[in-house]
Image: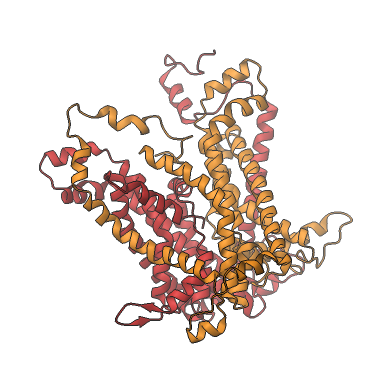
């Protein structure tokens, strides 16, 4: 066996540096190989970014440049016209507002309901715990698209005992649907955050005279704070990105921006410039939020099995 | 908190940690908890009610519906649709078009998952090899791709492959001796599907590469360096050291990719302007168009049930893996 590349005897500075790029192998690496790898990495990144660049490029071009037979790789007369006409397009602002309302409602609801459920799974061992875990895991894999038909029929005719409601073509029906869409993920992720808090803290607090409710308010809830933020942001992305359910259930003035983008394409040919501008506006919250929580998002995905 | 919550990246302190630190003679947790077994159920109740109402009930309703014949008439009048037994299933399963859709969906899933996972692993390995600045560039590029909503990504690809003004045609046309002016990518299903596959792989690589890269950082570098010094080729190191350690994580991401790609809807839907031709139908779009386009709600339900059944094998596998992780904490 070979000794580790850096021994504890090495100077502190060198040790820190080595720690920072852990996992980078130093043995048996040729210079040509490194150059090749770096080139491949750059080429890969540029290729990945090209479509993202292309949507930006198109959005800032005036109409005649968008439809030039020889596409320009740089907007020679950059303009905000496309963004303005997207905002002025019928229902754009309405659908944007709808999307915000629906998403906020769904996320807030899922957070409250999901947190309680997560608390039960993470902090109690009780008869039926495994069954609940199983339910949470199974339902997040049920394709919502497959349930769209019964969901549509169900929301059309909600029987509350004293009255029947038609929740299709309403923001409430979609909000509740989205709440449930992100609920399994919320429960599962928050479970992870809560079980990360040492139980000793709970026990110490209880020995000091706290009730269970106080333990919850004073210890678990504050310490889960970052987890709640990450989870709600992820829920936001999920709900904001959804369009099939809302597109099927609701008429154009009760849509969100995603569905707006979809309908904008089918009705009257395609105005590519405004469409790309609309796509950028729609993506901004998602991209920003995503970049904020990107450290946690892989956790959520491998745990949550939900894709945007 | 590690980037990926899986056996491969789990830090050793996680499983046994709290128990080791426990003060000897502290209150036995089991007795206390059994006394309050109503509380956890009360806590979980709202979640269970929501799940039962909006997932459980529709699931049952879908099953029931698949044994009925719900058409537009029944939908409007609200009458109970006639029971038809297994007719919808017979109809679907004896239809050549349906089998073509199943075959296409399976083939697409196999090809796209294989390409995505291999490419993702390749990129993850590349990330371990490049200079730090290049690695950062790669991560930033992938983060932007990952963050784009599926629908927007699909719209971008629709624009780039536009037959008249698409940049893809323009660039290919530049190659000597190739005429791609006004070339339509979706006339030939092979070409159309290669566009869809490119889109799916492009959008899927960030998750795979970044997750697998996180897994790779957990592979002890001493092992790899020792192997290199002992004369192992990079390929041997990969096969005998890296892959075995990465296996649980690879399993999870592959299973997830299968589940996601098998349910392909958005990409095919958007690239075909919301009216996928028969050769661009997948099980998801087919069930949807049967139900909402043709008002054959029961046939759509039957196809959805078959889809779920087909996915069940993969799902069970995924749930078993996740269940183990959930049990450890």
- Quadrant in the picture for residue A59: bottom right
Looking at the image, which residue sits at the far left? A209
Count of all numbered marks drawn on residues in the image: 0
- Quadrant in the picture for residue A194: top left
Q: Where's residue B315, x and y in %?
A: 52, 50
Q: Is residue A131 above or below residue B167?
A: above
Q: Where's residue B37, x and y in %?
A: 23, 49
**Residue at (41%, 50%) from the top-left corner?**
A134
Of the chain colours in the picture, the one used for chain B is orange
Left or right of A12 in this view: A67: right
Left or right of A32 in this view: A96: left
Q: Where's residue B14, x and y in %?
A: 36, 33
Quadrant of the image for the N terminus of chain B?
Answer: top left
Residue nearer the viewer, B317 or B86: B86
**Residue at (83%, 54%) from the top-left corner?**
B175
**Residue at (45%, 63%) from the top-left corner?**
A239
Looking at the image, which residue sits at the far bottom? B77
Left or right of B144 in this view: A237: left
Residue nearer the viewer, A213 or B282: B282
Quadrant of the image for the C terminus of chain B?
Answer: top left
Chain letter tied to red: A
- Does residue A57 show up? no
Residue nearer the viewer, B137 or B231: B231
Q: Where's residue A273, x and y in %?
A: 63, 71
């Amino acid at each position: 066996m070979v000794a580790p590349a850096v021994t504890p005897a090495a100077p502190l500075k060198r040790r820190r540096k080595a720690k920072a790029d852990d996992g980078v192998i130093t043995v048996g690496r040729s210079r040509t190989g490194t150059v090749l790898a770096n080139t491949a990495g750059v080429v890969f990144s540029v290729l990945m970014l090209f479509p993202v660049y292309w949507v930006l490029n198109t959005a800032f071009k005036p109409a005649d440049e968008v439809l030039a037979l020889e596409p320009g790789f740089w907007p020679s007369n950059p303009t905000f016209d496309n963004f303005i006409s997207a905002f002025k397009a019928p229902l754009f602002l309405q659908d944007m507002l709808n999307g915000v309302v629906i998403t906020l409602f769904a996320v807030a609801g899922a957070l409250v309901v999901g947190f309680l459920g997560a608390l039960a799974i993470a902090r109690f061992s009780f008869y039926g715990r495994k069954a609940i875990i199983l339910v949470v895991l199974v339902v997040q894999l049920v394709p919502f698209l497959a349930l769209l038909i019964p969901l549509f029929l169900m929301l059309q005719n909600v029987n509350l005992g004293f009255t029947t409601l038609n929740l299709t073509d309403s923001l409430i029906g979609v909000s509740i649907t989205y709440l449930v869409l992100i609920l399994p993920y919320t429960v599962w992720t928050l479970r992870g955050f809560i079980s990360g808090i040492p139980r000793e803290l709970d026990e110490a607090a209880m020995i000091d005279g706290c009730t269970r409710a106080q333990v919850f308010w004073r210890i678990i809830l504050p310490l889960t704070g970052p987890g709640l933020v990450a989870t709600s942001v992820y829920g936001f992305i999920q709900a904001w990105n959804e369009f099939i359910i809302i597109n099927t259930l609701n008429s154009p003035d009760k849509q969100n921006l995603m569905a707006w983008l979809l309908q904008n394409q089918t009705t009257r040919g395609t105005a590519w410039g405004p469409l790309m501008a609309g796509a950028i506006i729609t993506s901004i919250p998602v991209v920003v939020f995503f970049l904020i929580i990107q450290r946690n998002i892989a956790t959520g995905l491998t745990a949550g099995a939900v894709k945007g | 908190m590690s980037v990926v919550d899986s056996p491969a990246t789990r830090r050793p302190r996680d499983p046994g940690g709290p128990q080791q630190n426990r003060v000897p003679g502290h209150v036995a947790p089991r007795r206390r908890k059994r006394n309050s077994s109503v509380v956890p159920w009360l806590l979980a109740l709202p979640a269970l009610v929501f799940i039962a109402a909006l997932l459980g009930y529709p699931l049952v309703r879908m099953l029931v519906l698949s044994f009925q014949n719900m058409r537009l008439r029944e939908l409007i009048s609200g009458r109970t649709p006639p029971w038809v037994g297994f007719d919808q299933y017979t109809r679907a399963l004896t239809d050549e078009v349906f089998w073509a859709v199943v075959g296409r969906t399976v083939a697409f899933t196999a090809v796209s998952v294989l390409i995505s996972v291999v490419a993702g692993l390749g990129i993850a390995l590349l990330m371990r090899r490049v200079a730090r600045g290049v690695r950062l560039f790669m991560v930033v590029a992938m983060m932007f791709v990952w963050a784009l909503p599926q629908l927007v990504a699909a719209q971008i690809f629709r624009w780039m492959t536009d037959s008249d003004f698409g940049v893809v045609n323009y660039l290919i046309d530049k190659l000597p001796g190739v005429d791609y002016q006004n070339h339509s990518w979706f006339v030939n299903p092979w070409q159309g599907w290669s566009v869809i596959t490119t889109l799916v792989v492009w959008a899927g690589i960030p998750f795979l590469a970044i997750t697998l890269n996180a897994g790779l950082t957990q592979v002890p570098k001493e092992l790899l360096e020792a192997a290199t010094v002992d004369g192992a080729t990079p390929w041997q190191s990969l096969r005998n050291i890296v892959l075995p350690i990465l296996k649980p994580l690879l399993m999870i991401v592959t299973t997830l990719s299968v589940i996601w790609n098998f349910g392909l809807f958005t990409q095919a839907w958007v690239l075909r302007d919301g009216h996928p031709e028969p050769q661009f139908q997948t099980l998801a779009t087919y069930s949807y168009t049967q139900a909402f386009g043709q008002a054959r709600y029961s046939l759509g339900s039957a196809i959805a049930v078959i889809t779920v059944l087909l996915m069940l094998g993969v799902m069970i596998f995924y749930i078993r893996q996740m269940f183990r992780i959930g049990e450890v904490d």
